Amino acid sequence: MTHSAPTSILFVCAGNICRSPLAEGVMGEVLKQRRIDHVLIDSAGTNGYHTGEEPDDRSIRVAARHGLDISAQRCRQLIAADFTRFDLILGMDHYNMRMIGQRQPANASARVGLLTDIAEGRPVEIPDPYYGQIGDFEEVYRMILASSNALADQFWRDAAIKGQASSTT
């Protein structure tokens, strides 16, 4: 089934402090590089333990190593209105998907799915690096970058081609 390009994407993990803030920052940069500026990108957590806090310091450091500043993001919890505000809601792992499903209201209009499955057609979980080391955050970054590029290729391939310099004049 072919889906139209979303105008809004919400990335969701458990606490909105590690994976989903990285995904928000990475996807924003991928779209910026393709000169796509009409897509709302946000992130949320299935729990509210960290509401109002900035992302995990390790996520901020890994993002900074790759030229991204996610330090201004603030954690928030997934709410019912997100299911009508966003076109696409993407979870990071199967647990997140179960929690998203439990919160999904009857009037939901958003397409909901696992990030890697929607982006790359393979249902691979993006592991929670919270209890890991900085290398685990780097691996999560790489996985999110691959999925973000695949998602952009899927929905905005023509925009990427138009944004490239032409060798013919």
Image (cartoon, helix red, strand yellow):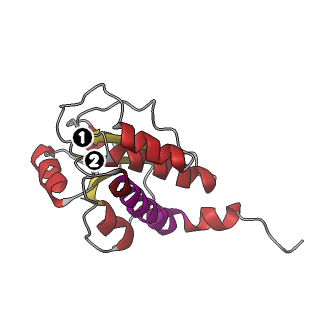
Please, what is the three-letter code of the amino acid marked with disc 1?
Gly
Q: Locate residue 37, reporting x and y percent.
A: 58, 46
* Residue 40 appears in the rendering: no
Residue beneath label 2, please?
12
Residues tagged 2 and 1 counted as in contact (Cβ below 8 A): yes
Q: Please state if 54 lies on the left or on the right of 71 as rendered.
A: left
Q: Main secondary structure of the magenta part?
A: helix
Which residue is found at the position 20% from the left and 45% from the top?
14
Residue located 30% across and 74% down the image = 122
Q: Which mark is residue 23?
A: none
User: Would you say residue 124 sits in the magenta stretch?
Assistant: no
Name the residue furthest left. Answer: 102
Q: Is residue 148 magenta?
A: yes
Amino acid, disc 2:
Val
From which residue to which does the magenta span run? Answer: 137-156
Which quadrant is home to the N terminus? Answer: bottom left
Residue depicted at x 32% and y 66% = 116
Task: Kindly identify which residue carries mark 1.
Answer: 45
